[in-house]
């Protein structure tokens, strides 16, 4: 039995006007149908036209954009519909969940009132304010918001990202729409929160029977949520299929490469960087838009844009579908670096012990010169980690766990608030000026947004030379070194004269990397270096990092929230929660048998780009939100969200009163977990009494 | 929130103290009441001058800090001293404060109100006739210095009266001296006198506020939350009305406290040109006479109004924007 | 956490649009507003500096045969009540006003930039002290201080007067610059330079000031107009430029009471003043658009 069609899109076209008044096509003939209750995943990299497609459906394109073609919602043509009639449909029959809920909510109105307004616009008779407020609370409860009364009374900025996005979903389903369009609903959220939001979205969809158009760049999210998938490239759908078929047997080289470039948390496999970059809007054609990057390209591909063709609901816009059948992703888009290696041993280069850092709570100034003791919040409470020469250590955790603060404490090269940092044998609390200068050369940092870290007004050559100047290298040596550095990161020496905005995101990260490597650092700190990049570009950067590592590059401390990336790149992993190190060990050990309940939950929340495996997996959905930096307190910080704690009886007083310290083998090689009841290596939860109680609970 | 505002008040009080001190010192250094007395005809003896100066507390032979000490001791007890002509500064202050406040208040209210309305209107109709007309208007007004604008108004009124053959628009002073009649006559008389000065002050405010409000409204028109409001089913007009206006006023509050400075200066010019017996003209006269006590009193008034405007802007900001309330 | 790939994409677009020297110039020349403004400013400067050579009258000459003379072939803009040639006087006054305006704008923008970047970059007590000074100077309208101080500086001539105008006109620029510096300081490329061991003043010079350049250029442009307005206003009330020297302000003052009987004495100087300020505003507004500063300066004034 097939459900009735609710939305039928045919030959949808969107173009944006550029500064010169030319129309740049960003969506070039997109078509799909949505049936009641169905989830269609619209996936693609940035610039593929996903968001423009979604906005065109609601008539919410920015000024200057034009939409053409057809989109019929329950038989009503949406494209070209007058604004008044469109307004009557929006919110009632078609609703939208936006990417950034902080910006999408009115900052000056309570969340409950904003949800209530959606009801009052469409419900007749118009509900009273009181009734609308009550309904808003029910809706919030429906998307599993804890304490809906409080959330309804809050202003958007007072809520966490996950709560805001769930409130946004509640607002979207207020009038039980027929179609929900969700544009990257989870892309700025932590994996654990992302799982909660996707759950809420799924529940909301089931409750209303709506069809869901889920727009995402994240194949893992799509694999776990969608029934059917449409892959977009350069403004067109290049492949569409039921989710299992698409992931199992892609029929378009782009899809194959895309799937091959997604890192998986369950195995370290070579990733497939797709060479080149997608065409700019208006720059595609005359043939297949992917032809310039396609290893299977044939003469015919360059002359004529292929149409979607295929069978059994699996269509691909590719004339080489048959040739693709024998190819694997790794065969088609080979990586340059060996995926495996034996982790180096030896003396630690960086040793962080008991590191703590706190900030004064904002809002209280020393007006009139009167200082009062301020409350301080702890960003870091006790961080322990070590990095050996040549080793890559990943530092993972949710946002607010203190990962970046740890990096900043290390790079500050100053005396920490408490604890110690030792780099290459120097204790940072006792450095002379000369030592600091030497260490500035020995430690370099690479940050998330490559555009932001490169001064847009400087030439690439000057950017790369800046650390060399700071280390007082002679001019001639610098001039000789710059082209070599650029070549080393896969750029052309002729790129030196250009400015960073001429480069794509991936290339910019390569420039930043060349700059970080310029002075031959011993330790490279990386702060989410690939999370702002599209997966195919990310695969290229990860490949480059692996190759540099194989060439005896620096030791790396790699901060990321993405456990799948950790699996691909790191030798060891350190897990942080609420400013504390909770687990550490070799990557295969920790991923194979996580001991801390938090690590287990974190791992189970990582989206798997493998639909059957994603369905089969048992997920530990954590309640609550990642903790805000808190005041110093005894006991385990994780206990409020901990499934092990929840199942405990009287023994739980230990979690409440005794701060757990890392237990396990030798902290350097071994696998440690800071938990009173760690899971054992077989995965069974630990029991009380496995460790002798050293400190009786304090009353 | 209350804590934040009380901190602002404390900061303001400190600024007020420092600014009064500073203006006292600057006025004492820059002005010479001695010269004023010595220029009198017949020329008074040195002893008389010294006596007069000592009475005023502005004897330049006493160190300035000591004079400030005496002045502030009296000021704390509510006495701002005497003018060079021997009148109580307090009395003069009382006479003039109403005149200036009326002009400032009307200028601010009319200027802000009309400016905001015009700005929103221009933003909604951007690149169309109302927007272009308003742009040209505000450019012209902003390009005419306030004193020239006031002069133009004055000359225009003069010309108008001359061609009409009798005085239609009264523009000198804030009321007709010696006017008798009912309350209504007085109110009408004041209103007629108020028209041109108020228009001068308000016009400058409208020109700049409308530019800022237009920009702020355009920002809001492109904001995500207005798009959300439309996605909920509001038409663009209603979305702007219900969700855009309030947020677009938030940046204006910051501009308000700075715009007030310009407004204040404009009001000083306007008073002077239209012969209003307000704080501004008092200041000019006192500065020429070397009347330190009066100058300091006007500076005190200026500082208090400027700080008050800043405080009002802060309160408005907090009322409009819940995000600063929790800060 | 990641904001998704779109954030980089967006920043590319804005940065591609952000002009450097040459493209800014080209964009300016495409804007009719800017063209008109630039042409006017240039014409007024030419008039101010070439004007004195065009007429045989000097601004101090007195033609006893023509008192309150209407514009004529001999006196292009008429004469004053004591027979001075108004054209000679007006171009002289224009010269003075433009010179003072330009110098004051330059000086006050430089002061504002110095105070603002230091307060923003160093933070802490440096910031607190500098901002208290700014707040303090903003509490008393600068015009009042000018009225008090200008007569005292009379002996040093107009440069002292210009210096005073600059000293009282930099505070709002400083606040705006400080806010921008605060956010620039947190930008990763500044942090990166710090981590590499680049010194603070070098960072301000190499990484902070270049990013403020477009704001400062626009600010200086608008400041020229503000300075000319302050100067003429003060001179009008007798606190600025002193006789025998003339500025547009003193000319307007002497022309006011005869504006209806001898309109040339009022309207020529007032008209030139208006034209100049309008032209500067046109250029400033076009610059603001081209350099993408956003017409809302208030946003940076927090």
Image (cartoon, rainbow, N blue to C red):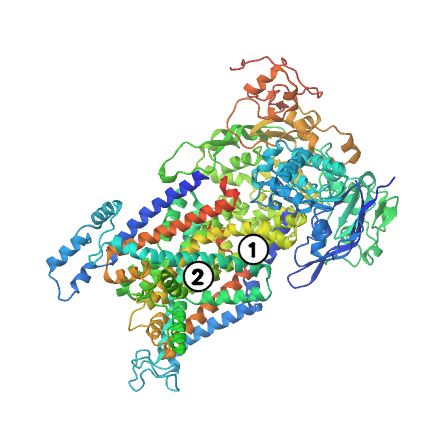
Front residue (pair A304, C246): C246
Front residue (pair C294, C260): C260
**Residue A27 vertical position relative to residue A113 in the rendered view, above or below:** below
Q: How many marks?
A: 2
Residue linked to disc 2: B202
Q: Chain of mark 2?
A: B
User: Which quadrant holds residue A344?
Assistant: top right
The tag on residue B217 is 1
Quarter of the N terminus of chain A within the rendering:
top right
The tag on residue A139 is none
Front residue (pair A123, C174): A123
Residues packed near mark 2 inside 10 Å, few (<14), some (14 to 19) or many (20 plus): many
Question: Could you tell me residue A139's position as x and y percent?
Answer: 67, 36
Question: Could you tell me residue A286's position as x and y percent?
Answer: 79, 59
Does A21 sit left or right of C258 as displayed?
Answer: right
Say which element carries label 2: helix
Does B8 sit left or right of A284 as displayed?
Answer: left
């Amino acid at each position: 039995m097939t459900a009735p069609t609710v939305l039928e899109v045919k030959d949808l076209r969107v173009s944006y006007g550029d500064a010169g008044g030319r129309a740049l096509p960003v969506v070039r003939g997109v078509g799909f149908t949505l049936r009641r209750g169905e989830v269609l995943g619209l996936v693609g990299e940035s610039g593929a036209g996903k968001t423009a497609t979604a906005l065109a459906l609601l008539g919410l394109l920015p000024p200057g954009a034009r939409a053409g073609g057809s989109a019929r919602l329950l038989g009503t043509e949406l494209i070209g519909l007058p604004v008044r009639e469109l307004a009557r449909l929006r919110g009632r029959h078609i609703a939208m969940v936006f990417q950034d809920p902080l910006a999408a909510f009115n900052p000056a109105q309570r969340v409950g009132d904003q949800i209530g307004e959606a009801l009052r616009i469409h419900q007749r008779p118009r509900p009273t304010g009181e009734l609308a407020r009550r309904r808003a609370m029910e809706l919030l409860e429906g998307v599993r918001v804890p304490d809906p009364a409080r959330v309804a009374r809050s202003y958007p900025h007072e809520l966490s990202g996950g709560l805001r996005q769930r409130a946004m979903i509640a607002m979207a389903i207020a009038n039980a729409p027929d179609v929900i369009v969700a544009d990257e609903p989870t892309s700025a959220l932590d994996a654990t929160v992302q799982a909660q939001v996707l759950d809420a979205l799924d529940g909301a969809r089931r409750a209303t029977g709506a069809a869901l158009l889920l727009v995402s760049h994240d194949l893992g999210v799509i694999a776990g949520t969608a029934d059917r998938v449409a892959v977009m490239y350069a403004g067109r759908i290049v492949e569409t299929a039921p989710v299992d078929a698409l992931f199992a047997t892609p029929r378009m080289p782009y899809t194959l490469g895309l799937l091959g470039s997604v890192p998986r948390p369950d195995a370290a496999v070579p990733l497939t960087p797709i060479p080149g970059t997608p065409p700019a809007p208006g720059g595609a054609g005359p043939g297949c838009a992917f032809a310039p990057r396609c290893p299977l390209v044939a003469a015919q591909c360059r002359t004529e844009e292929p149409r979607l063709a295929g069978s059994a609901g699996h269509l691909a816009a590719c004339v080489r579908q048959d040739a693709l059948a024998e190819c694997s992703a790794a065969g088609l888009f080979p990586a340059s670096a060996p995926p495996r290696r034996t982790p180096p041993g030896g003396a630690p280069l960086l040793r962080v012990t008991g590191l703590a850092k706190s900030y004064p709570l904002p809002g209280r100034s020393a007006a009139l010169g009167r200082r009062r003791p301020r409350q301080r919040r702890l960003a870091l409470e006790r961080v322990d980690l070590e990095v050996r020469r040549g080793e890559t250590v990943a530092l993972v955790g949710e946002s607010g766990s203190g990962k970046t603060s740890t990096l900043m404490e290390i790079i500050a090269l100053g005396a920490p608030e408490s604890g110690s940092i030792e780099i290459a044998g120097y204790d940072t609390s006792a450095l002379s000026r000369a030592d600091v200068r030497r260490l500035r050369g020995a430690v370099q940092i690479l940050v998330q947004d490559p555009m932001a870290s490169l001064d847009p007004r400087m030439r690439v050559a000057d950017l790369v030379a800046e650390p060399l100047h700071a280390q007082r290298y002679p001019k001639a040596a610098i001039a000789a070194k710059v082209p070599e550095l650029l070549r080393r990161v896969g750029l052309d020496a002729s790129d030196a004269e250009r400015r960073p905005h001429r480069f794509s995101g991936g290339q910019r990260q390569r420039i930043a990397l060349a700059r970080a490597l310029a002075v031959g650092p011993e330790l490279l700190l990386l702060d989410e270096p690939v999370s702002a990049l599209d997966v195919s570009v990310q695969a290229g950067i990860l490949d480059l990092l692996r190759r540099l590592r194989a060439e005896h590059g620096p030791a790396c401390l790699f901060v990321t929230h993405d456990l799948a990336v950790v699996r691909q790149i790191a030798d060891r992993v350190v897990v942080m929660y609420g400013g504390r190190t909770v687990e550490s060990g070799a990557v295969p050990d920790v991923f194979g048998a996580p001991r801390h309940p938090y690590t287990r939950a974190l791992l189970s929340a990582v989206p798997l780009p493998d639909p059957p495996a994603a369905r089969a997996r048992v997920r530990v959905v954590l309640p609550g939100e990642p903790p805000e930096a808190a005041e110093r307190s005894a006991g385990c910080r994780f206990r409020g969200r901990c499934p092990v704690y929840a199942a405990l009886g009287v023994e739980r007083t230990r979690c409440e009163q005794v701060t757990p310290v890392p237990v396990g083998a030798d902290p350097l090689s071994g696998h440690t977990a800071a938990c009173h009841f760690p899971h054992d290596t077989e995965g069974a939860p630990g029991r009380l009494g496995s460790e002798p109680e050293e400190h009786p609970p304090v009353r | 929130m209350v804590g934040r505002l009380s901190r602002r008040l404390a900061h303001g009080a400190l600024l007020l103290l420092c600014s009064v001190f500073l203006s006292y010192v600057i006025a004492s250094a820059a002005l010479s009441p001695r010269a004023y007395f010595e220029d009198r005809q017949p020329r008074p003896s040195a002893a008389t001058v010294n006596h007069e100066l000592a009475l005023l507390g502005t004897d330049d032979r006493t160190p300035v800090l000591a004079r400030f000490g005496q002045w502030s001791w009296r000021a704390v007890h509510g006495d701002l001293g005497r003018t060079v002509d021997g009148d109580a500064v307090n009395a003069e202050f009382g006479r003039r404060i109403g005149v200036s406040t009326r002009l400032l208040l009307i200028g601010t209210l009319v200027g802000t109100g009309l400016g905001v309305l015009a700005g929103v209107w221009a933003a909604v109709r951007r690149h169309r006739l109302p927007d272009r007309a308003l742009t040209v208007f505000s450019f012209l007004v902003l390009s005419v210095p306030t004193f020239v604008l006031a002069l133009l108004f004055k000359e225009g009124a003069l010309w108008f009266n001359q061609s009409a053959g009798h005085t239609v628009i009264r523009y000198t002073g804030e009321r007709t001296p010696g006017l008798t009649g009912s309350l209504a006559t007085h109110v009408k008389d004041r209103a007629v006198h108020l028209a041109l000065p108020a228009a001068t002050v308000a016009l400058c405010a409208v020109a700049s506020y409308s530019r800022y409000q237009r920009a702020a409204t355009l920002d809001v028109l492109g904001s995500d939350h207005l798009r959300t409001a439309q996605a909920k089913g509001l038409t663009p007009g209603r979305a702007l009305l219900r969700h855009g206006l309030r947020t677009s006023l938030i940046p204006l509050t910051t501009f308000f406290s700075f715009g007030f400075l310009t407004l204040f200066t404009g009001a000083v010019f306007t008073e002077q040109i239209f012969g209003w017996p307000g704080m501004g003209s008092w200041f000019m006269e006192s500065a020429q006479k070397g009347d330190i006590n009066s100058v300091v009193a006007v500076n005190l008034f200026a500082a208090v109004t400027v700080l008050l405007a800043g405080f009002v802007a802060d309160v408005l900001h907090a009322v409009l924007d819940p995000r600063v309330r929790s800060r | 956490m990641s904001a998704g790939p779109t954030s980089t994409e967006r920043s590319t677009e804005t940065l591609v649009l952000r002009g450097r020297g040459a493209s800014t110039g080209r964009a300016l020349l495409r804007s009719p507003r800017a063209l008109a403004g630039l042409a006017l400013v240039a014409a007024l400067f030419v008039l101010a500096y070439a004007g004195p050579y065009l007429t045989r009258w000097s601004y101090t000459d007195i033609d006893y045969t023509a008192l309150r003379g209407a514009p004529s072939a001999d006196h292009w803009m008429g004469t004053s009540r004591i027979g001075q040639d108004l054209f000679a006087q007006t171009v002289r006054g224009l010269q003075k006003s433009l010179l003072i305006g330009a110098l004051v704008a330059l000086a006050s923008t430089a002061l504002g930039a110095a105070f603002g970047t230091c307060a923003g970059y160093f933070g802490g007590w440096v910031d607190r002290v500098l901002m208290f000074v700014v707040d303090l100077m903003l509490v008393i309208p600068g015009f009042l201080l000018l009225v008090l101080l200008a007569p005292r500086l009379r002996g040093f001539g107009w440069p002292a007067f210009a210096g005073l105008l600059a000293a009282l006109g930099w505070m709002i620029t400083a606040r705006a610059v400080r806010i921008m510096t605060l956010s620039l300081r947190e930008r990763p490329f500044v942090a990166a330079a710090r981590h590499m061991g680049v010194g603070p003043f070098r960072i301000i010079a190499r990484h902070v000031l270049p990013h403020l350049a477009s704001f400062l250029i626009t600010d200086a442009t608008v400041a020229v107009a503000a300075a000319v307005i302050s100067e003429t206003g003060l001179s009008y009330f007798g606190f600025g430029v002193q006789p025998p020297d003339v500025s547009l302000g003193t000319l307007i003052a002497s022309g006011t009471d005869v504006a209806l009987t001898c309109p040339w004495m009022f309207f020529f100087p007032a008209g030139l003043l208006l034209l100049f300020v309008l032209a500067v505003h046109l250029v400033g507004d076009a610059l603001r658009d081209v350099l993408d500063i956003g017409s809302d300066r208030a946003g940076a004034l927090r």
